[in-house]
Image (tube, grey):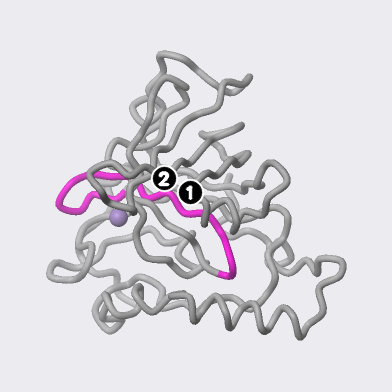
Amino acid sequence: MVAARLPRSSRCVILPGMSPARKKSEAAASDQGGGLDRYHAKRDFTKTPEPAGAAAVEPVSPDRVYVIQKHHAGHLHYDLRLESGGVLKSWAVPKGPSLDPADRRLAVEVEDHPLDYADFEGAIPAGEYGAGRVIVWDRGTFRPQGDASFETMLEKGSVKIEIAGEKLAGGFALVRTRFGGKKDNWLLIKEKDTHARPGSAVTDEAPRSVLSGKDVDDISLQPVAQ
Ligand code: MN
């Protein structure tokens, strides 16, 4: 069985040398840098079951939230989300992730999502932003690799992380490209390590939710009675 939520304590580790005052100002700064404004502006929370959420003020733990949601909207795609600054940095990956280091998967950066979104599985009603079905395809934690902070690597467009999920594991690179002149385009690439599986297609081999065991089209489009 998979725990539906990570223990609260995993988000609340006080890092040495981090005063409460510093934490608060950092959270405020990340809000001003965009935070969840775009996420909230796109959605009507009286109509969608998605969490309204808020940027967390807790400092991140060394093990950060990692989730990939499979989203059958207009087109089927996979949404990679990685915790940073109290929110989930997000990329839409049209073909989904791969464990084959030869695959370079386009990952289009989209708006930050609240941490609560990592547990969201359900149907977004017709007419709403992202209308369609969502499952939690993979879930776990990640750690940034190397000396630079995760936030610095994001800014530079060259990210290395170690994922500990149920389906994905080991090193991954996220590299910003200038493909088509767009700065939102990144490539998601599996590192060559013991978790690499050349020639494999993990999205075909393991299509279902790690929370419910459902595939994305098993999610009912009928609103769930509260
Ligand atoms: Mn999506």
- Looking at the rendered structure, the kind of residue marked 1 is Gly
Q: Residue at x 41, y 45 (%)?
A: 176
The kind of secondary structure element at disc 2 is: strand
Residue 209's place in the image compared with 110, above or below, is above
Residue 138's place in the image compared with 42, above or below, is above
- Left or right for 74, reference 210: left
Is 128 contained in the magenta span? Answer: no
Viewer-proximal residue, 45 or 77? 77
Q: Residue furthest right?
A: 16
* Residue identified by numbered label 1: 157
Residue 210's place in the image compared with 6, above or below, is above
Q: Is residue 206 visible?
A: yes
Q: Horizontal and vertical percent for residue 56? A: 59, 75
Question: Mark 1 packing: few (<14 Cα in 10 Å), some, or many (20+)?
Answer: some
Q: Ligand 1: which quarter? A: bottom left
Q: Horizontal and vertical percent for residue 225? A: 30, 74
